């Protein structure tokens, strides 16, 4: 980094904070904060995040855009395996707790794997996360698992007394008491209801509800064996196997690449 250029590009507030710091340590902290601020400005965001258009580029800032590894994120191995994403990219406690619940209830490995994977699409996209997740994993798992994960997107909104599944109270506070799912969700639910794999998807929602315990930490190591038997890990690493979904995994590896 060109030090003189960096210092002259600081906002007046950051420059004043650094200049006014009483001790060397405080100065170093203020400088580090300013560098983080400068780095964040250079980090790309999905275009959808800019409802008013992308902010104009600072004409005095001619540094290259960030590509490949983001210094604020841990570096991934060259041929990353699924477990590396749990350790280095995902916020995995919810899915781990969900898989733990399914395991303790004695469900088979297909159900446990479905629970373990069911929300990893949220690390890529909130909207329609079940659909995103199903696509991400489809080349590597049994079709029943990806089907069930796609359908959990819709099933969450519909109660089923046979499985003691009620409409989640949390959704009332999150979406309002009047919230009604879109017709495409209702249609997907009705189709799934008639399907031979309905139970697999329904069990994802059953093991989903009670898996938000902030005081519980579940380790991924407890599921590495099940993962190995139920997820076909490509030898080139996820993101580099040339599959139709490799770009999704690369997006998780380098989430702030400019283009
Ligand atoms: Fe979900
Ligand atoms: Fe979930």
Image (tube, rainbow, N blue to C red):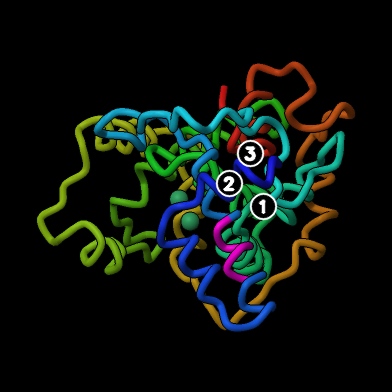
Q: Which residues are magenta?
A: 29-34
In space, the residues marked 3 and 1 are separated at their CA atoms by 14 Å
In space, the residues marked 1 and 2 are separated at their CA atoms by 9 Å
Residue at image mark 3: 252
Which residue is nearer to you in this view: 40 or 197?
Answer: 40
Q: Is residue 112 magenta?
A: no
Residue name at image x 67 percent, y 70 percent: 28
Relative to 198, is 166 on the left or the right?
left
Residue name at image x 54 percent, y 38 percent: 42
Instruction: Give the SS element for disc 3.
Output: helix
Q: Is residue 32 magenta?
A: yes
Which residue is nearer to you in this view: 89 or 120?
Answer: 89
Residue at image mark 1: 72
Residue name at image x 57 percent, y 22 percent: 259
Characterize the magenta stretch by its predominant secondary structure.
helix
The local crowd at label 1, few if under 14, some if 14 to 19, many if 20 or more residues have their Cα within 10 Å, is few
In this orientation, does residue 193 appear? Answer: yes
**Place of residue 10 in the rendered image (x, y in percent of width and height, measured from the top left):** 50, 51
Proximity of marks 1 and 2: CB atoms separated by less than 8 Å: yes
Residue at image mark 2: 39
Residue name at image x 68 percent, y 46 percent: 3
Relative to 147, is 24 on the left or the right?
right
In space, the residues marked 3 and 2 are separated at their CA atoms by 19 Å
């Amino acid at each position: 980094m060109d030090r003189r250029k960096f210092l002259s590009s600081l906002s007046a507030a950051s420059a004043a904070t650094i200049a006014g710091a009483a001790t060397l340590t405080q100065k170093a902290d203020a400088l580090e904060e300013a560098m983080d601020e400068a780095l964040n400005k250079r980090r790309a965001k999905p275009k959808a995040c800019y409802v008013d258009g992308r902010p104009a580029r600072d004409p005095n800032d001619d540094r290259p855009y960030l590509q490949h590894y983001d210094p604020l994120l841990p570096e991934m191995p060259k041929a990353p395996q699924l477990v590396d994403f749990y350790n280095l990219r995902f916020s995995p406690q919810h899915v781990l707790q969900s898989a733990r619940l399914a395991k303790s209830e004695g469900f088979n490995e297909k159900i446990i794997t479905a629970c373990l994977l069911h929300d990893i699409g949220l690390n890529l996209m909130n909207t329609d996360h079940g659909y995103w997740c199903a696509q991400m994993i489809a080349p590597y798992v049994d079709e029943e698992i990806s089907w069930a994960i796609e359908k959990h997107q819709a099933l969450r909104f519909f109660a089923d007394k046979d499985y003691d599944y009620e409409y989640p109270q949390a959704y009332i506070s999150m979406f309002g008491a009047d919230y009604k799912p879109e017709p495409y969700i209702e249609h997907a639910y009705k189709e799934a209801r008639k399907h031979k794999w309905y139970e697999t998807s329904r069990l994802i929602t059953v093991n989903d509800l009670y898996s938000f315990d902030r005081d519980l930490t579940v380790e991924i190591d407890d599921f590495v064996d099940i993962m190995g038997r139920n997820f076909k890990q490509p030898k080139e690493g996820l993101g580099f196997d040339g599959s139709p979904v490799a770009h999704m995994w690369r997006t998780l590896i380098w989430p702030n690449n400019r283009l």
